[in-house]
Amino acid sequence: MDHQSTSIPESVPTSATIERRAGAPKGTRLLRRPAVEALTGDSRAKIYEDMLSGEMVRPIHVAVNKVLWVEDEVQTIIDARVGGASPAQLRMIVGKLHAARPQRLAQVLEKVLGPEEAHRTLAAPVTPQPQKRPRGRPRKHAAQQVRAPTASKSTSPLESVAEVV
């Protein structure tokens, strides 16, 4: 019986090609979904199903329609699966990885901005963006047009219907 080796198609960016493109050290790379699929061996549906159940790390949203996974977080999940981790253990690992993300941000800011500026940046309150006013005429909702019947002296159903109309 002839076994064919399964290889990743060249159109799928592997972590090695992403590393060459970005020149980033191992562990700090960000992976697109096809690369995560290739690393884990899971389909897109299985990856998102595992994310919903808490057994896979969530991606980082970098744009409106673009998400990326941190390579060392994905590799940690793969290593745990190979080690025979139960779903409960995977959920615990994912929780710890997500909890470590703010600390990782602080480290990056310290490296890039310096300790004082990083501390000021992290300590500054985040101001929410002002809500935009809706344009155009306000629409009347059906709930505003029909008035609820008020307590009346009459007990006849026909009289209460006449009050509503």
Image (cartoon, grey):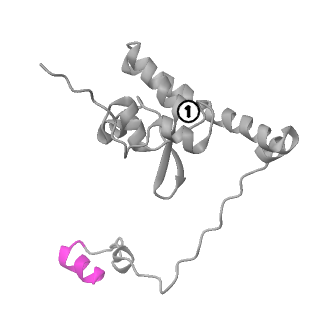
Residue lying at the far front in this picture: please name it: 2
The reply to whether residue 52 is visible in this rendering is: no
Residue for point 73% across, 34% down? 107
Quadrant in which the C terminus appears: bottom left
Taking the magenta stretch, the answer to whether it contains residue 38 is no
Kindly identify which residue carries mark 1: 98
Q: Which residues are magenta?
A: 155-165
- Choose between 6 and 127: the one closer to the eye: 6
- Seen at 45% across and 25% down, the residue is 77
> In terms of image quadrants, where is residue 108?
top right
Residue 80 coordinates in the image, percent (x, y): 44, 18
Between residue 26 and residue 124, name the one nearer to us: 26
| Location of residue 163 with respect to 111 vertically, above or below | below
Q: Quadrant of the N terminus?
A: top left
Residue 130 image-quadrant placement:
bottom right
| Principal secondary structure, stretch drawn in magenta | helix
